[in-house]
Amino acid sequence: MALSEIENGCPGGEGGESDLIVKACVLGGFSETVETRALISSLPEVHGDPVTSESTTERFLVIMNRYQEQPHLLDPHTEWMLNMILEFVRSEKSPPSLVHLSFKFLYVVCKVRGYKIFMQLLPHEVADVQPVLDLLSRQDPKDSETWETRYMLLLWLSMTCLIPFDLYRLDGHLESDGGKAREPTMDRILAIAKSYLLVSDTPRDAASVLVSKFMTRPDVKQKRLGDFLDWSLTTISQTNDESMRDIMAKLFKHGKRDDLLQYAPTILQCLEQKHLSESSQAMLRRLGVKLIQRLGLTFLKPRLAAWRYQRGSRSLAANLSMSQSTVAAATGTPEVETQEQEEDYDIPEEVETVIEHLLAGLKDKETIVRWSASQGVCSCFQESDNAWHGGCLALAELGRRGLLLPSRLTDVVPLIIKSLTYEEKRGACSVGSNVRDAACYVCWSFARAYEPTELKPFVTQIARAHFAAFQENVGRQGTFPHGIDIVTAADYYAVGNLNNCYLNISVIRELATKALHNLTPQAPDYMATTVVPQLLPMAVGIDLHGRHGAIMACAEITHALYKQGLQTNRYILRTKGFGGELMRPAVCSIIEKLSLSKMPFKNDPVITGWQWLIDDTIKTLHLVSSGVKDAIMVAVVSALTALCEEYYQAEPGQADSQMQGELNYYCLVPLSPQMLTRCGSALALGCLPRFMIQGKLMQILEGLQHMCTVSQKEGSFTEARRDAVGAIAQVCVKAGVCAHGSPDSALCSENVAEVYGALLNSMNDYTTDSRGDVGAWVREAAMTSLMEVTMLVAISAPEILSPDLVKCMMCCLAQQAAEKIDRYRAHAGNIFLSLLHSTEPEVPHIPHREELLSIFPTTTTLNWNAPSQAFQYITQLLGLPQYQRHTLLGLTVSVGGITESTVHFSSQSLFEYLRGIQDNYAALAQFGDTLLTIFRDNLRNERVSIPFLKMLNQMLANSCFEILTTQENHQFCVELLTLCKEFKKTKDISKLRACVAVFCGLIQFQGEVRKKVLSQLLMLLCHSFPVIRKATAGQMYEMLLTYDDVIDPEVLDDVMTLLSDTNCDLATVRTHRNQLCDWLGIPSPRVVAKVTN
C-alpha cells in the first residue's frame, strides 16, 4: 500500500504552526495474487482446524480490506477467486465445514467489491437453480456461525431467478421418490424469501435483493404478487422492518403502473399509520419517502404540460434564428387551451397526502432524504443549507417536468439568484457548495422547459450560473447578450481544460496564479507594492489551501516582475510545513521561478534546503496518489533544472564540484525498490545541464543502463525503464559528441557502443501486465532516443557509427514497423523513414540504402497507422536479406494476431510477396530457412509461437510452399514437423489447436514425412482434452476432402464415418484410432511405460 504521511509544522517563534499530518492511501493494483491463491487453495487442509481456519480467514480479511477504498482493483481477479472457491462448494466430497468456510471467503470478496457488481459474476444457468435452492433449504437460519453461507446463497438464488422462462418448467413431475407431492419451485423460493425477510441479521439484505428480482418476473407477478403485498403490509403494520419498505419501493420502481395501482391506496394508508417522518433512523425515513413518492407517481397519469418548451431543430443556428423571428408566434392558441382542457382529469385524493409527506421530507436534516423528496414536489425555503438545497432540487425537478407555471417565474428567479451565491460560514469552514450546484441545476432545467420570451426578463440574472447552465440557456433561448461570443471564448471544454482556463481566459478566474502572471505586466507597481505583501502572510499561514495559492502566486508574480526588469525586494518564504501532494509542487514552482528570476541566493543556506526538498520529493514519490504524481515529477524536474543553471556553476560553464558530487544519489537509485523513485531519478538525470554532466557522463550512463536492464529482468518498473531510456538520449544530447574525446565528458568511440546497446536492448521489451503491452512504452521511448542520438552523432562524428550498430538499429525499426499496434508501428515507420531520408546529416552504413529508397522514395506520403497502406510497403523488405528476419518476425504477430483489419491487410501483403517468389526456388528456400530460424528462436515465447503457428497455417492453406512440396521429405517440412512436436505435451488449448491445423497443412508434402504427420494427428485424436480430440477429427475430415491422394478411395467413406463420431469415451476413441491406423497404413501408437529407478 502506498501511504503518504507528511508532517507540517513551523516550530519555534510566536504563532508557531502546530503539526499537521496529512495521509493519503493509494494502491496501484492487486499485488497479493500469489498469496491469495495460496490461501484459497489451502481451504481443504485448514477447514477442520478452528485455529488454522481462523488465522487463514483473518489473513484473507487483511488482504481484502486494503482495497476497501479502491475495490475496482479487484475486478481483474474476482472471477478466478470466485471459480476457485465455487469448486469447493460444488464438490460432493466437500464436508459442511469446508462449504461454510468457502462461503465466508466469498462474502469477504463480495463485501469489499459490493454485492451489485459481485453477484453478476455468480453462475446463473438453469442447472444452478435446484442445487442452490436445495443447499439453501438445508441451512439453519438461527445458526450465527454460518450467516455468510446464507447471505451468499440468497444472492446466488437472486441471480438464478433471472432465467427467462416460466419456473413451472423446472418442476417436472411434482412427485418425489416416496410418492408424496413435491412443492413447486416458485413456492419454495417465495417461502425461503419470506422466512429470511423476517430475520434480524445480514441475510435479510440479501433476501430483499432476491424478492425485488423474483416478484417482478411475469409469471410470479401474475400468480403471487397480490398475496405477497398483503403479507408485506401485515408485517409492516406489526413492525418497523426496514427491509420490507425497501422491497415495496423496489417493486413500485420496477413494476408496471397498471399492475400496482389497485394496491397503492392500501399501502399508503398503512404507511401513514406508521409515522415514518418521526423515526430516528435516516435510512428508514429515506425508504419511506422513496416509497411514498413512487406511490404518488402510481396515482398520477403521465402528462406533459402544453405550455412547455417545444424542442425544435438540433441546429444551434436554427434555434437562434427561430427565437429572433417574431414574438407573436409564441402566444397561445385556442387549440392549445382546448388540448389542456381535454387533458384534465380527476386527481386522486391520495396525491395530497403524498405531497404533504414529501414537503416534510424536503426539510429533513439528511441529504439522502431531501434528495428523494425533491424529485416529487416543490419546496418551502428556510434559513438552513439543508432546506435551500432540497428546495432547489425540487424547483429543478418541477421545471424539468413542466410543472412550474411561467407566471411563477417572477417569484422563483430571485430565490434562485440568491441560491447561486449562497454561502454560510461554520467555524473554520463554510457550507453552501451543494446549494450553489443545485441552483445551477435549476437554471439548466429552466432552459429546457420555457420559451425564450418567458425567460427573457431574467436573462441577466440567470447568466450568473455555472457554465453548463449558461451554455444551455444560450443555445436554447438565444436572448443572452453576446452569448455566442462568450460560449466561443469560454466553451465547456476550454473551461474544463485547466491550463487553457487559467492562461487564455484568466480574467474570469480571480485566484489563478497563471492569470496573475499574465496580469502583472499590466500593473507591475501595484503587484509589487500591494499584491505581494498581501500574499506573503498567507504563504506562512495556517490554511493549507491558502498557503498553496499564495506560494504559487508569489512565484508567478516574482518571475513576471523579473521579466519587467523591476528591482524586487528579497522575500524569504520560510515554508516549513508541506501539505504533501498540494504543497510540494507549489514550493518546487517557487524554486523554479526564483531561480529563473536570478535572485541573489548563491551560496546561501536556503539553496541546500531547496536541494533537500527536491531530493526528498523524489524519494517519497511512491507515497503520493496516482492522480498528481505526474504533475509533481514535472514540477521537480523544472525546479532542478533552473536551480542547477543559476546556483551550481562555480564559473560559467563549470560545475560546483561539491554539488556535482551529489549526483551519486541519482545514479544509485536503480537499486531502489520504489518504481516512482526510479522514475524521478531518471528524469532528474535527464534534465541536468551540460556543465553538471561533464566528468560524470560514464557514471550517469551506467546508472541509467542499470535501471533499464535490472528492472527488465525483474519484469516490473516499466515506467522507470521508459524514463531511463529517454534520459539516456537527453544526457547524450547535452554532453555532445567528440570522436576521440573522454568517455566521461562526451559521447565518443569508447562509449557509443554501450549507449546503442542499452537502447537496442530496450527495443525488445515486451513486458505485459494487467494493463496490456506496457513494454511498448519502453520501445517507443527507445525508438525516439535512437533517432535523437543517431542524428546527433551523424552531424558531429559519423565515423564512430559502425555498420553493425546501424544495421541493428534499422532492422529493429523495421521489425517494429511491421508489428500489430497501430500507434507504435506508425512511430517506428516514421523514424525509419526520417533516418533513411535524412541528407543533412546523412546517416552512414544503412543496409540496402538504394533498394530502400526505391521502396520508400523521398516523396512518399505514407499513413503508417493504416494497415491498408503500411503493410504493402513493409512486406517489400522481405526481399532484402539483412531485413528479412526482423521484418518477418514483426509480421508474425500481425498476421497471427486477432485484430481483423491488421490480420487481413498484413496477410494479404505477405501472400502477395510470396506469390511473387513462387518461381524462385532459392528465394523461397531462403524464406523457409528464415521461418525456421524464427520458430526455433521463439519456441518457448508465447507472444510469438502461437501467432507464428497461425501464420504458418495460413501459408500452408494458400499453397505458398507448393514448389517445395514436389520434393520428397523436403528438409523444410522435416524440421518444421520436429519443432511442432515440441508442443505435444503442452496444456495450452490454443497452441494445440494451432498445431493441429499446421499438421493438416503439412500433409501436402510428399514422402515419409507425410506418414509422420499422420502419426502425430492420430495421436492427437486420443488427446486427454475432448476439445482437442474433436478439433483434430474435424480438421482431419476437411484435410481428407481437400487432399484426395492421402488415403485409398475404397476406405475413404469408412474413415469419414469414424472421424464424424467424436462423442465417444477415450477407450472407444482409441479403438477407432487404431482402426484408422490400419486403413492409413500407419503403425498404431503404443503406450510407453515410465522407467523408474
Image: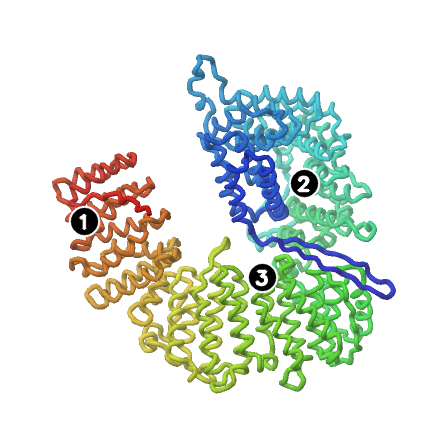
Quarter-of-image position of residue 852: bottom left
Left or right: residue 986 compared with residue 706 = left
**Residue 285 location, x and y as percent?**
72, 32
- Under mark 1, the amino acid is Tyr
Quarter-of-image position of residue 207: top right
Q: Residues within 10 Å of mark 2 (few under 14, many from 20)?
A: many
Q: Earlier in the sequence, mark 1 or mark 3?
A: 3
Quarter-of-image position of residue 811: bottom left
Q: CA distance from mark 2 to mark 3?
A: 54 Å
Tell me whether circle 2 and circle 3 mark residues in contact (CB < 8 Å).
no
- Under mark 3, the amino acid is Pro
Q: Which residue is mark 3?
A: 673
**Residue 414 location, x and y as percent?**
78, 47
- Under mark 2, the amino acid is Glu
Q: Which residue is mark 2?
A: 397
Which one is nearer the viewer's eye here, 309 or 33?
A: 33
Which one is nearer the viewer's eye here, 546 or 560?
A: 546
Residue 663 at least partly seen:
yes
Which one is nearer the viewer's eye here, 326 or 149?
A: 149
Left or right: residue 308 compared with residue 541 = left
Q: CA distance from mark 1 to mark 3?
A: 59 Å
Q: CA distance from mark 2 to mark 1?
A: 73 Å
Residue 521 at least partly seen:
no
**Residue 516 location, x and y as percent?**
73, 69
Q: Which residue is mark 1?
A: 1043
Q: Earlier in the sequence, mark 2 or mark 1?
A: 2
Residue at disc 2, secondary structure? helix
